[in-house]
Image (tube, grey):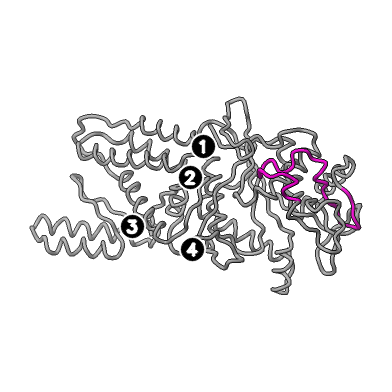
Amino acid sequence: MKLYNTLSGDVVSFDSTLEPISMYVCGVTPYSSSHVGHAMSYVYFDTLRRFLEFSGFTVQHVQNFTDIDDKLIAAANDEGTSVKEIAERRIAEYFDVMDRLNIARANYYPRATEEIPAIIEMISGLIEKEYAYDSGGDVYYRVRNFSNYGRLGKRTLEGMNAGARIDPGINKEHPMDFVLWKEAKPGEPSWESPWGNGRPGWHIECSAMSLKYLGSKIDIHGGGQDLIFPHHENEIAQSEAFSGESPFVRCWMHNGLLEIHESKMSKSLGNLVTVEEALKFSNPDTIRLFFLSSHYRSPLAYSNEGILAQDRALDRIKGALNLRNADDLNSVFDGSEYFLRFCQAMQEDLNTPKALGIMFDLVREINKSRDENHSINKGQEHLKKMTEIFGLTLEDESKNVSGLTEPLVELLLEIRKEMRVNKNFSMADHIRDSLTEIGFILEDNESGTDWRLKSS
């Protein structure tokens, strides 16, 4: 498996001696509903995990919740409720929509508020090593003492310092020093610490949690490109200074951002589409295909038209998997070469667009082989493995509409069959057209008529 490493700017390889592979993915701050930008990132890392596990690796996957934050406090004040109540509600919503997208759950979901002792221990260690300092109840990281600060974001401390400023009332030694611990303010959640009551800064939370659950060195650390600086930059500075080990992360992976109306999707711009809203428009499989049709490092423009295009693509996949072999089989279509090419594409920095193209090459060959009276079972088995790596459930909505749906459709198809035998083609066509209008797809073949409900 070869993956692009943001830190080094090149591709790194994983070999079979690395067991298990440790993967930390930055999670959401649950102050509002999760949006499709979140979903895109987690679909990419879920697909990576699925492929690594299919390839024989064990993956130890950790994803955090930042459940104490300025935005959470502001949301709680707006609603007249507690930070904990909002966080619990939004976390429950998160699991609901991500489960529906078939995103496999991480091994651990640590929450910042439950890891305060580990965070305090790490801050104390950084102070002892002179990488941090107490300033009137706040604690800051001393960036000048970390020689490689700025390397991940391809920045220099001198360049960053030129445009930096210190807000009045903040006692920092250097404009780029960042907060590790915030002094408590009236009415805000706080915890006891050696520096007085307060709460952790954002960056230190992920360093403490990754250290606790995955150790001082991890294989993959993931998130959106908007986290490169300052969040992941600061994680490197904190973690390597505390542990004395480098590199903190073997491969930094960052996905491109989701765009809408030619700008980054964000709450501040008022152009968010929640995952719940997206799931009302289309089903989980087509949303996953939409994301995976773009390379994870590229930006992607969100649109309903793009989702609908993948809806039709999903119908093609289901159609190939639902085909039946003819009675008279001349030879076998194996399809293994397509699966090999699919895996090679996935090994090339998770090239899902290329892998998806190979998947549809296989779909076309399955259809062609079926028409030529070849056995297609082997080809279908390889196609099914591809869909599993892509995390597609391929649920048959036709069986979920109602308990009466399947027998009623089968009865109508029997009537249509009799109509065709009796050469009453107009009535047979009327039944077909009526079923099509209400969302069913019919496919006539030598063994009868296959049917399914459209994907949305």
From the top left corner, tell me how far across and down residue 107 is, in percent: 64, 43
Please state which amino acid type lies under the numbered disc 4. His
Using the image, determine if residue 249 lies above or below residue 275: above
Q: Earlier in the sequence, mark 4 or mark 2?
A: 4
Residue 314 is a magenta residue: no
Q: For the point 77% across and 53% down, which residue is it?
A: 114
CA–CA distance in space, label 3 to label 1: 35 Å
> Dot 2: few (<14), some (14–19), or many (≥20) neighbours within 10 Å?
some
Relative side of 154 to 288, left or right? right
For label 3, the residue is 453
Secondary structure under the numbered disc 4 in the rendered image = loop
CA–CA distance in space, label 4 to label 2: 20 Å
Name the outermost residue toward the left: 423
* Residues in magenta, as a range: 133-161
> Dot 4: few (<14), some (14–19), or many (≥20) neighbours within 10 Å?
few
Viewer-side residue, 179 vs 175: 175
Which of pointers 2 and 3 indicates the residue nearer the eye? Answer: 2
Which of pointers 4 and 3 indicates the residue nearer the eye? Answer: 4
Relative side of 99 to 108, left or right? left
For label 1, the residue is 349
Please state which amino acid type lies under the numbered disc 2. His
For label 2, the residue is 295
